[in-house]
Each structure stands twice: as C-alpha cells, then as structure tokens.
Image (spheres, rainbow, N blue to C red):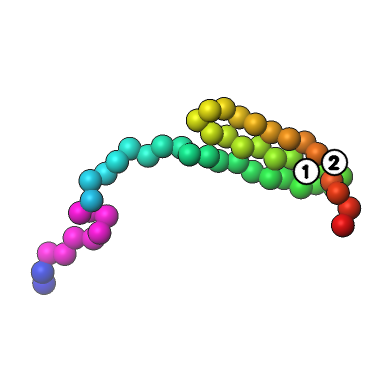
Amino acid sequence: MPNVMSADQTRPTLPRRLIAAGFIRRTPGRTTTVRVTAAGVTGVIAKAVAQ
C-alpha cells in the first residue's frame, strides 16, 4: 500500500487567529446580540419586534 499523505499534512501549519465570534439570543420580549473581535466586544439588548 502506498504512503499517502492527506492534504492537511502537506501544507505548513499556520497559527490560528480569532477573526470574530458571537451569539444572538432571542427570548420573549428581548433580543441580545454579542460580537467579539480582536478589536473588542460589542453588544446590543433590544426590545423584540412583533412580526
């Protein structure tokens, strides 16, 4: 059987960086949005909009 390397093993590994992460939480009457980046953290708590 030939020695086969996967594509991930042939590339040099680079350090990973956090670009952005966050979440949106919807509860009755309220929506919370949080976003985290290298520049900082932002967030909003807003009254839910009836549809």
**Which residue shows up at 57% across the image and 34% down it?**
36
Cα separation between marks 1 and 2: 6 Å
Direction top: furthest residue: 40
Can you tell which mark lies on residue 42? none
Q: Quadrant of residue 42?
A: top right
Vertical relation: 4 (above or below) 11: below
**Left or right, 42 with reference to 28:** left
Vertical relation: 41 (above or below) 5: above
Dot 1: within a 10 Å radius of its alpha carbon, few (fewer than 14), some, or many (20 or more) residues? some
Amino acid bearing label 2:
Lys
Amino acid bearing label 1:
Thr
Residue named by callout 2: 47
How many numbered circles does the render carry?
A: 2
Residue range corresponding to the magenta coloring: 3-10
Residue named by callout 1: 31
**Which residue shows up at 85% across the image and 41% down it?**
47
**Residue 38 placement (x, y as % from top left):** 50, 30
**Which residue shows up at 78% across the image and 43% down it?**
31
**Residue 16 placement (x, y as % from top left):** 37, 39
Whether the residues at callouts 1 and 2 have beta carbons within 8 Å, the answer is yes
Q: Secondary structure at mark 2?
A: strand
Q: Does residue 32 belong to the magenta stretch? A: no
